[in-house]
Amino acid sequence: MTRAKPVNPLVRFVKRTLRRAIANAAPGAESGVHIDPLTTPVDQLPPKLGTALHATPEMRTFRRVLQLDDRDVRESVLDDLATYYDISPEEARRRALHWEEESLKEWTAVDGSSSDEARVTFYRTQQSWSFDLLWWAYLQAEGYADPASVLAYRWLQQYSPGRRHLDFGSGVGVTSQLFIEGGWTSTLADLSSTLLDFAQFRLQRRGQKADFIDLAESGLPAGEFDAITAIDTLGHVPDLYATAVQLHAALARGGHLIANIDIREESAATVWHLHDDDLRAEYDLRRAGFVPVASLGYGLTAYRKAADGQARTLLRNTRDWLVLVSPPRRAARAITRPVLRILARRMGR
């Protein structure tokens, strides 16, 4: 038997760096219509993601917390939506698949001016994201969507100094459900009152207890949490640095933040995605006092709360400025980004 030729570590590093650069150079656009694994023809389904992760105990727990009684995940998800909104399961399925079209209608009905006031009103009145986020959880359970909550949970189970969890931008509550099932206390915080109400309904149906914070009415308590997850959330906040400062203050000493920043190119369907510069977003997190310690995949990064002295903080901030947002770095990005975009298109991204 021929022994496989070992991969040169330098080659592996270059390939990994190039893949990351290509991903950052080609931010996503609109999400479009969701797939339905049960009715979409097999030859039209995308390949499943995270095959190894799909068989882990944590993923089995994730699927279990989505379920109601002995019903499967799909039936449970549709029942949550149909019961809460007093519609049929088939109507719930239709609204889940076409959530983005519904979101654009809701956005236009609010104002459509892209002002902060209009955006807050949209967040607090829309219903379409309930359908989107819960169907996305179903797709994660089936292996057709990024298993972000499970990745965050697996990492924090090993590295968190405690078991007090905050889900910032908690959506329909599935991330908190996973942590609660694992023996953590969990607090759900969101600006969207409609999502908080729906999440509370879902957790009560399953007998899970949690705390809830409406961010329009109160801020985050200081030093209260050992771990914070902010999954697909920070891309929606207008002042990322100010938000990062609040998250840093909410963490206890030695705590961790796991977050991603959903960078999107501007379009009519991404009006609620507020950031299109991954380097500036990363810099805002770091200068707020977060030090990256691990890349978890699917865009998720684990950050440690820094508690350094003044001199070390200044040194770290200077380094981050040079690496991420200094004029030479911006010039290099301007030169390389078009090339990386071409590579991304050719790789079928």
Image (cartoon, rainbow, N blue to C red):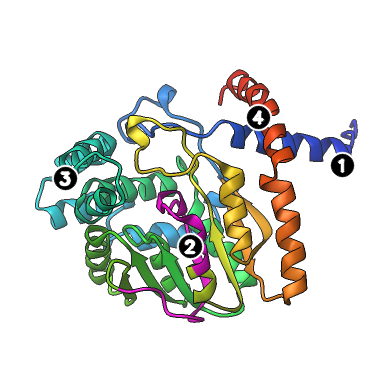
**Of marks 3 and 4, which one's residue comes earlier in the chain?**
3
Residue kind at label 1, given as amino acid type: Pro
> Of label 3 and label 2, which has the lower sequence position?
3
Please determine whether, in this image, residue 95 is positioned above or below residue 221. above
- Residue 318 image point, x, y percent: 74, 58
Q: Which residue is mark 1?
A: 9
Residue 213 lies, with reference to residue 174, above or below; the image says below
Q: Is 214 left or right of 59, judged from the image as shown?
A: left
Which mark is nearer the camera, 3 or 2?
Answer: 2
Query: Callout 2, which amino acid?
Result: Ala
Number of numbered discs on residues: 4
Is 233 one of the magenta-colored residues? yes
Is 195 inside the magenta-drawn segment? no
- For disc 4, the marked residue is 334
**Which element type, helix, strand or loop, lies under badge 1?**
helix
Q: Which element type, helix, strand or loop, lies under badge 2?
A: helix
Query: Element under label 3?
Result: helix
In which image quadrant can residue 160 be found?
Answer: bottom right
Query: Residue 331 got which mark?
Result: none
